[in-house]
Amino acid sequence: MAATEKKPTTIKKYANRRLYDTGTSTYVTLEDLAAMVKRGEDFVVCDAKTGEDITRPVLTQIIFEQESKDGQSLLPIAFLRQLIRFYGDSMQMLVPSYLEFSIDRLTRDQQKFRDQVSQALEGAPFGEPTRQAFQSLEEQARKNMAVFRQALAMFNPFGVPGEAAAAAAAPEPVAADAAPRADLDDMKRQLDELNKRIDQLSGKSAG
């Protein structure tokens, strides 16, 4: 860690659900933590008794509180349903990385999208600027999916373009145990399934 890098503030959560900011030596609320996030202030939340890191459930609770406010909802019902379906699914391990990747791209390009939405709102509700703004968002989603698939391919030893020709030119491999071959076959099956699911998602984004 660089000497100038600031450590995350520690927030302690007590049994009575009160949150204590060790940085300011004051009790805070979920609203205060939400404001800290918006200001870009990093923090970790730990159980005051056990020391367990409970940052994730606390952040989730903040989202729940924000979603419960009128006019503040960000998560569409269809998205929430699909997210629930991913739990326990073979795609589950890819979902966090893809969501992080997509939100990072959106964050970096947010000013461009702000400008486009602002221009759209100045015109007719369903005029050309509005269509252009949504088309831009859809195009960005498709680009995200394409780049993410490229990243996935870097970790995929199967299905590489031109593999059939390479296999034909390669010498016959030495016979191996059935167990390792079965493991590789299983990995290939799972990766093929993941690629099919990504194709389905990509098709929905393009629709």
Image (spheres, rainbow, N blue to C red):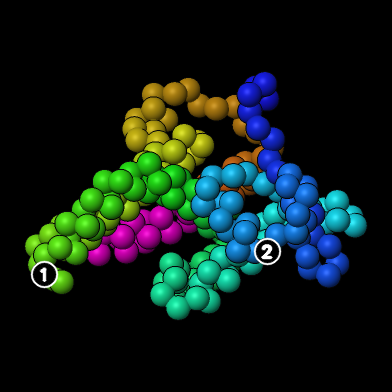
Task: Using the image as rendered, state which of residue 171 and residue 140 is in the foreground.
Answer: 140
Where is residue 93 shown, x and y percent of the image?
58, 53
Crowding near the residue tagged with mark 2, few <14, some 14–19, many ≥20 C-alpha atoms within 10 Å:
some
**Residue 88 at least partly seen:** no
User: In this image, 1 relative to 153: left or right?
Assistant: right
Residue beneath disc 1:
124
Residue type, label 1: Ala
Residue lying farthest to the right in this orientation: 49
**Dominant SS type (magenta):** helix
Residue type, label 2: Thr
Where is residue 57 shown, x and y percent of the image?
68, 62
Task: Using the image as rendered, state which of residue 92 and residue 155 is in the foreground.
Answer: 92
Task: Name which residue lies at 63% across and 28% down.
Answer: 5
Where is residue 92 shown, x and y percent of the image?
57, 58
Task: Using the image as rendered, state which of residue 69 and residue 178 is in the foreground.
Answer: 69
Magenta-tinted stretch: 193-207
Task: Name which residue lies at 36% across and 61% down.
Answer: 200
> SS at mark 2?
loop
**Residue 186 at least partly seen:** yes
User: In this image, 39 relative to 149: left or right?
Assistant: right
Q: Which numbered circle lies on residue 195? A: none
Single out the mark in the foreground, 1 or 2. 2
- Which mark is first along the chain, 2 or 1? 2
> SS at mark 1?
loop
Task: Name which residue lies at 86% across and 56% down.
Answer: 48
Residue 151 position by quadrant:
top left
Quick one: quadrant of the N terminus? Answer: top right
Q: Which numbered circle lies on residue 29? A: 2
Task: Using the image as rendered, state which of residue 194 and residue 162 is in the foreground.
Answer: 194
Where is residue 123 shown, x and y percent of the image?
11, 65
Number of numbered callouts drawn: 2
| Disc 1 to disc 2, C-alpha distance | 41 Å
